[in-house]
Amino acid sequence: MSKGKIICCTVLTAALILAVILLFIFRHNNLSDQELQKRLSDLPSAFTVTAHTGCMDTQENTLAAIEAGAENGAQIVEFDLNFDENKRAVLSHDAPVGGEVMLDEAFRKVSEYEDLKVNVDLKNCAALDEIKAIAQKYGILDRIFFTGVNEDFLESVRKADLGIPYYLNVNVDAKHKHNITYLESLAKKVQDSGAIGINLNKNQASAELCEVFHEKGLLVSVWTVNRKREMKKILGFLPDNITTRNPKQLNEVIRSGN
C-alpha cells in the first residue's frame, strides 16, 4: 500500500473514531423525548421553576421582572440583594449607585401573588436583619430563602440566625461531578454548613450529584438554564429546582416532554 493510501486510511479511521466518541457524548448528555418523558415522572414532587431576574426580556432587578416571572408560570422569582451606603436593602447585582428598586417595593409586589416564593440572591450581608423585617411586614417571611451564600458569606448568614433557609453556592469540580466519593464529601460539606441544599451552575450538575444529595436529604438547585436542549438535559438529572430566564418555555418542556 502506498504511503498516500496509508495516510488516507489513518485519517479516515481517526475521523470515524472521533465521530463515535462525539455520538457517545451527545447520547450521554442528551435524552430522547421518550427517555425524557420517563424521567419527568420521577421529578421531585416539590420541583420548582425559578424565574431569574430579567426573565422574559425584562430589565434585571425590577418590578417588571417579578411580574413576568409570576405571570409565566414560575413558582419562585429571583433577584439580587444589595445594600446602599445607608444600609438600605435594594435590588442590585453591583454596588448601588442610586435609583434601584427598594426591597420594600419588591416584597410588596411579591405579596400580591399568592404562594409566590422569592430567591434572594445575596450580594452583600451588611444588614441582613432588614431583609427579615421587611418580609415580616408583608407577611412573606415563610416564602423567602437565600442563595449567593458562598464561603465568604456563610459566617455572616449563620451569625445573623434569621431562621431563613439558604442554599450553599458551591463551585463543583466538573471533572468529578460523576464521582460518588467526591460527591458524598461535597454533600457533607453542605450539610455541615447548615444549608438546605446546593445551588450550582448548570455545567457542574449531574444525575449522580442529584442522587447523592437526595440520599442525604439535601436539595439541588441548578442555574441558569435558558436553552431548550439544556432544559431537557438538566431535567433528566432530576434536580429540585431549575432557574431560567425563560420560565414559560421550561414549563412547556415539562408539560409536553419535548
Image (cartoon, rainbow, N blue to C red):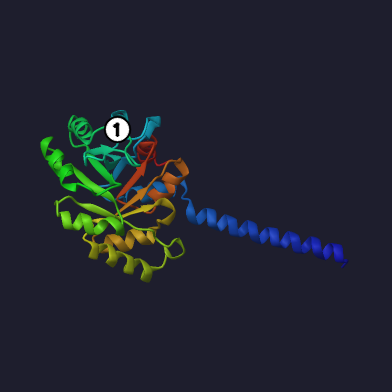
Residue at the spot 48% in from the left edge and 54% down from the top edge: 29
Does residue 222 appear in the picture of this structure? yes
Residue at the spot 74% in from the left edge and 59% down from the top edge: 12
The quarter of the picture where the N terminus appears is bottom right
Residue at the spot 47% in from the left edge and 64% down from the top edge: 175
Residue for badge 1: 100
* x then y, percent, for residue 196: 23, 56
* x then y, percent, for residue 230: 45, 46
**Residue 98 falls left or right of residue 16:** left
Q: Secondary structure at mark 1?
A: loop
Which corner quadrant of the image does residue 258 belong to?
top left
Q: Is residue 150 above or below residue 112?
A: below
Q: Is residue 214 above or below residue 52?
A: below
* x then y, percent, for residue 61: 32, 35
Which amino acid, mark 1?
Glu
* x then y, percent, for residue 217: 23, 60
Front-lying residue, 137 or 230: 137
Furthest-front residue in view?
85
Does residue 142 appear in the picture of this structure? no
